[in-house]
Image (tube, rainbow, N blue to C red):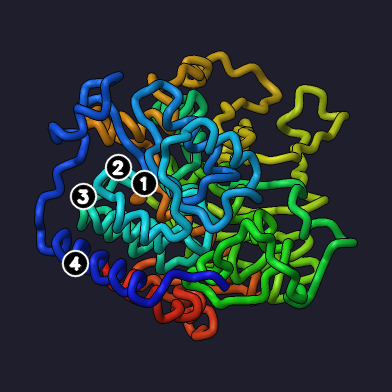
Amino acid sequence: MLRGSMTEQDSTRRRFLTQAGSSAFGFTFIPAYLTSARAQNNPRKPPSQRLNVGCVGAGGRGQKVCQDLSRKGNATITAFADVDFASAGRIAENLKAFPKAKRFTDFREMFAKVGGDFDAVAVCSPDHTHFTAAIEAMSMGKHVYVEKPLTHTFEEAEILMRAEKKFKVVTQMGNQGHTSGGSEQFKRMVAGGVVDDVVRIDAFKGPGLWFMEKDKRIKAYPKGEKMPESLKSWDLWCGPRAVKEYHSLLHPFNWRAFHLYGSGMLGDWGCHIIDYAHHYLKLGLPTQIRAKKLVDHNEIIFPLSSELEFDFPERGPQLPAVTMAWKAGANARVEVGERYLADPGKPKTVGGAGTLLHRKQEDYLVQRASHWSTSRLISAKPREDLQAAMDPAGPKNDHAESFVQACLGNGTTESPFSVGGTLTQVLTLGVIAEFLDSDLDFDPASQRFKANEAANALLAGDPPRQEWADHYKLA
């Protein structure tokens, strides 16, 4: 494995802890775009109107996130950190778009050497390394955009939510649909009473990842392969988690299938499917998670297909207790009852990706797909009385630009860690139920499972490897 010298690593770590300590004791960070030195290097924009961004993870989702952040010319990428500048999807496009961006293998080195050159950080690496990059950036006073799911474990999400309050930086989780016409419509639906008294949510996602194909299933970690020359450090790729042998099933993309590094279909798509219902109906944390049916369960990769149920308690008027049923896999379809159909002789099912919201009155259903899609009513009778609340008009800025503008002091983000963190926690609780193949009782107040220490241990996961342990002590 190729790694920096101990002297370089120790120097980086000491500088990181010093910077983190300064922030923890209340020192004020002055964003670089407000300094006169930055103005000399930004001839295209006044210094108060341009955001410089360091990106952790240059390919895959990183390519799209960098493109989105810089699209309107109010932000640019000044540095990349990635363990492999060749293998990830569309990485060449990113490097071509930002040829002057400095490149580093280790994000800690990027922060230490050129951290003064950027004001915000976009974290687009695999799920299991989101936390360490995000918490270090926040401790240095950097605004942070983190791809979904926010973190790999329940506890990591909790720490980042504390850090958001402690370091007072702008944050945004990358569930893009949360800043869209679909989300604005759902807000109006809440205000107009369209989604009052929802008692059941069917959430579903068809197969789309390799582990959901029967002939590709495995029950043990794959044997090691020769690393590509472009991969500079497998140790860094593994981050705080255990180091397994390199294999192409893990890098550059297929890691999502493995419990050790990814979050399966629930963690991947749940952030795009249940985000509106979770946030705007104030679901919070569940009190019970039931593993209804897990096909080909094992502790290495996620199930071939999965059916879970989450129980959420009553939250107030028009917000009764809710059961959310999650289906993922080939049979992830939900039947629409005849009472909701204008022609009851033709039963209908919905599938693909989305949610179906059921009211206790059983007068209509609310259907939505995923990401930024809008909602529609399924009703046997016309509901002209609700159409005004179904207006799909969108916000001024999209998800990425709202982050850029918030960093520049203009407005706020729609999915800060205080929103995306709790959603991620719900998903991690479901992932724990999938791993254990067990029903679980959870206490939202204590944030612990009841009488289940095996499940409680998974809230934090295995202790991080020693070189990453300090990151878990910052907030």
Screen quadrant of the N terminus: bottom right
Screen quadrant of the C terminus: bottom left
- Left or right position of 310 against 337: left
What secondary structure is marked by label 3? Answer: loop
Q: CA distance from mark 2 to mark 4?
A: 18 Å
| Location of residue 165 in the rendering, given as x and y in whole percent from the top left corner | 23, 54
| Mark 1 vs 3, N-terminal side | 1
- Left or right position of 36 against 158: left
| Residue of label 3 | 168
Q: Nearer the viewer, residue 154 or 122?
A: 122
Q: Amino acid at mark 4?
A: Thr
Mark 2 and mark 1 residues within 8 Å of each other at the beta carbon: yes
Viewer-nearest of discs 1 and 3: 1
Q: Is residue 412 at all visible to an observer of this figure?
A: yes
Mark 3 and mark 2 residues within 8 Å of each other at the beta carbon: no
Q: Is residue 423 at all visible to an observer of this figure?
A: no
| Residue of label 4 | 18
The numbered disc on residue 118 is 2
Mark 4: few, some, or many residues within 10 Å (few <14, many ≥20)?
some
